[in-house]
Amino acid sequence: ENDLEVQRIKDRMHESTAKITAEAEKEAAELLANTKLETQTLLSSAQLQVAKNRADADRIMSKAEGKIAPWIEKKKEYETKLREMAVYEYLSQNEDLVISGKMDDEGVNVMTVADSILQSAKDPGSRSAILAELAIIGKASILNTTDTATTPAG
């Protein structure tokens, strides 16, 4: 009978242990599920806030870019003018450079270049000097022909 009593106590002990273990596992599973749910809720909320903040930032940036666009355009124009001035400064240091009138005024351009060649020619018999004189003579004869054709005979 003692053995039977001991067996009953052991059975009750196992039953209580199994019951406590089952309840603990159930409670742990519920806590884990609730924790995961809260974590996901917090993450989702944070991601939503991030998306809202980025949208606000993009809106503010585009508004600012629209506001400063004319200033940026003026800055680019200024930088272009500075580069242009640097080119002119560089060109001004070239003693051999000849600048003449408009591009469509070929006669003046040819005469200016020819004159520059003649002034800088060390040898008046050089090929460049002779070609410059021929260019001047050619332009002068064209101008004389044009003047006599447009002048009324008197």
Image (cartoon, rainbow, N blue to C red):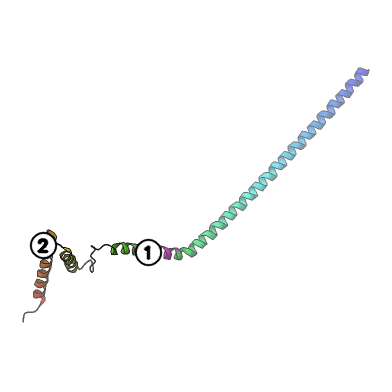
Q: Which one is nearer the viewer's eye here, 7 or 46?
A: 46
Q: Left or right of 2: which side holds 137?
A: left
The amino acid at mark 2 is: Ile
**Label 1 secondary element:** helix
Q: Specify start and end residues of the magenta stretch as a single range.
A: 72-84
Of circles 1 and 2, the one toward us is 2
Q: Residue furthest bottom?
A: 154
Q: Is residue 74 magenta?
A: yes
Q: Within 10 Å of the Cα at label 1, are there few (<14), some (14-19), or many (20+) other Cα atoms? A: few
Image-based side of 132 in relation to 103, left or right: left
Q: What kind of element bears circle 2?
A: helix
Query: Residue 60: x and y, percent?
Result: 54, 60
Residue type highlighted by circle 1:
Leu
Magenta highlight on residue 140: no
Give x and y (percent) for residue 74: 42, 66
Q: Which residue is mark 1?
A: 82
Question: Which quadrant is home to the C terminus?
Answer: bottom left
- Relative side of 121 to 23, left or right: left
Residue at 18 percent of width and 64 percent of height: 120
| Quadrant in which the N terminus is drawn | top right
Question: Looking at the rendered structure, which numbered label has been put on residue 130?
Answer: 2
In depth, the one of 114 and 20 nearer the eye is 114
Count of numbered circles in the view: 2
Classify residue 101 by image quadrant. Answer: bottom left
**Residue farthest along the right direction in this orientation:** 1
Coordinates of residue 25 in the picture (x, y in percent): 76, 34
Which residue reaches farthest left? 154
Which mark identifies residue 17? none
How far across and down, in percent of the image, does residue 44 sit? 64, 48
Query: Which residue is the extreme one toward the front?
Result: 122
Which callout, 1 or 2, points at the residue further toward the start of the chain? 1
Most common secondary structure along the magenta stretch: helix
